[in-house]
Amino acid sequence: MSDLTGKPLLLQLNFPFCARFCSHCAHPGSRYDAGVVKAHAQAMVEEIKAVAAEEAEGRAVTAVSLEGWPGLTAADDLQELLRTVRRSFTLAEDVQIGAETVPGDYSQAFMRKLRDNGVDLWTVNLLTADYEEHRLLERPYRFDALTMVDTAIRTFEMRDLSFRLLYGIPGQSPLSWERTLDKALAYEPGHLTLEPLQLIPGTRLHEKCRAGEVAACPVEEKVSLCEQAKAKLEKLGYRQYTIYDFALPGHENRFRQELLAGTDRLGFGYQASSCVDGLCYTNGHGLAEYVAHSTELEVIADRVSRLSGEGQALRLAVGRLERLEAVEGTALGGHLAPLLESGALENTGEGCRLTPLGIASGALSRLR
């Protein structure tokens, strides 16, 4: 491995447990079990200590992201994880620590222990504020639980608030999308992530659409919904800085920014992904195996690959496209022609850029 001293580093802490799986979701996850969740958290602590001893020297962590559903892990265990991160790695003075949540996560213990250990970006995975859309997605929290965010904002100093919303849900109308946007904007968030729903084979929602029980949203309507949101947010001072992310000045998600720019990432927890100096792998195989061997990378690492020079160039090119920048067509190799033919890319005087169709259709997901 080459000398990485002085180069920034990102940390991803993955929490793969779900109270119930949403109908559109294809992420590999595990059913909630309190004993297993606690054992997984302890395994993450040990993994962090072991990996830091090998990889952390001379590198400053600029952003940490708690992903999945960390709120299903006990507040004391989350506190210990964040303390272990601080003891094991050198954190940049202005490090940003973000946590994904759902509206029902905001207990006093959860908020206080994460906030007191540096969490300053709170992402609420709301997806939709429409009752029928919520039912269709089979979201695993009470629909009225968003009121708990009100309490959290009044009770705690939430430095930065973000909402993750979904467009292109079957049956979603411009009016219901407008209401979802307005519901999120009422909390005056500094950041919003707007993602197009992708129907993934094998999910319950995909099967419902295939059986004709519900009608999939045409990609042209997704483009319209995306443009509707973009126009609304730009009038309010939000800047679109990636294909999915909008922020008021100074409220960008640093983990997301630097990840797309090619900064190395170390992932901890079952199904977390890492890519350091061109070596990429996932903590895969099985949850029980991860818990038993979390300090042994040779046991838990799955889908291990070393990026070639061409692979590195493609990764950086995709990242630039996701940051709404132009790239040279040669950087995309054999992927260029199909993207141009489908209308996902357009050739400009500066190079190739994603079109609104390319954003709404999720065209880049096949290149990641």
Image (cartoon, rainbow, N blue to C red):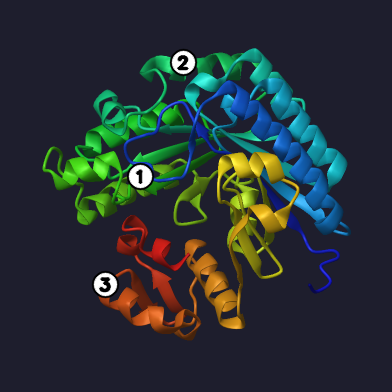
Left/right placement of residue 363 relative to residue 88 reads left
Which residue does the numbered mark 1 point to in the structure image? 229
Ranked by sequence position, the earlier of labels 2 and 3 is 2
User: Alpha-carbon distance for marks 3 and 1?
Assistant: 24 Å
Which residue does the numbered mark 3 point to in the structure image? 342
Quarter of the figure with the N terminus: bottom right
| Mark 2 neighbour class, 10 Å CA radius: few under 14, some 14 to 19, many 20 or more | few
Residue type at mark 1 is Ala
Q: Quadrant of residue 56?
A: bottom right
**Residue 227 or 261: which is nearer the viewer?**
261
Q: Quadrant of residue 176?
A: top left
| Mark 1 neighbour class, 10 Å CA radius: few under 14, some 14 to 19, many 20 or more | some
Residue 361 visible in the displayed image: yes
Could you tell me which residue is drawn at 65 percent across and 20 percent down?
110
Q: Is residue 24 above or below residue 3?
A: above
Ranked by sequence position, the earlier of labels 3 and 1 is 1
Could you tell me which residue is drawn at 24 percent across and 45 percent down?
206
**Residue 67 or 233: which is nearer the viewer?**
67
Q: Which mark is residue 147?
A: 2
Residue type at mark 3 is Ser
Label 1 residue SS: helix
> Farthest residue toward the left?
212
Tell me where residue 161 appears, x and y as whole percent.
57, 32
Q: Quadrant of residue 42?
A: top right
Could you tell me which residue is drawn at 57 percent across and 71 percent down?
316
Ranked by sequence position, the earlier of labels 2 and 1 is 2
User: Alpha-carbon distance for marks 2 and 1?
Assistant: 23 Å
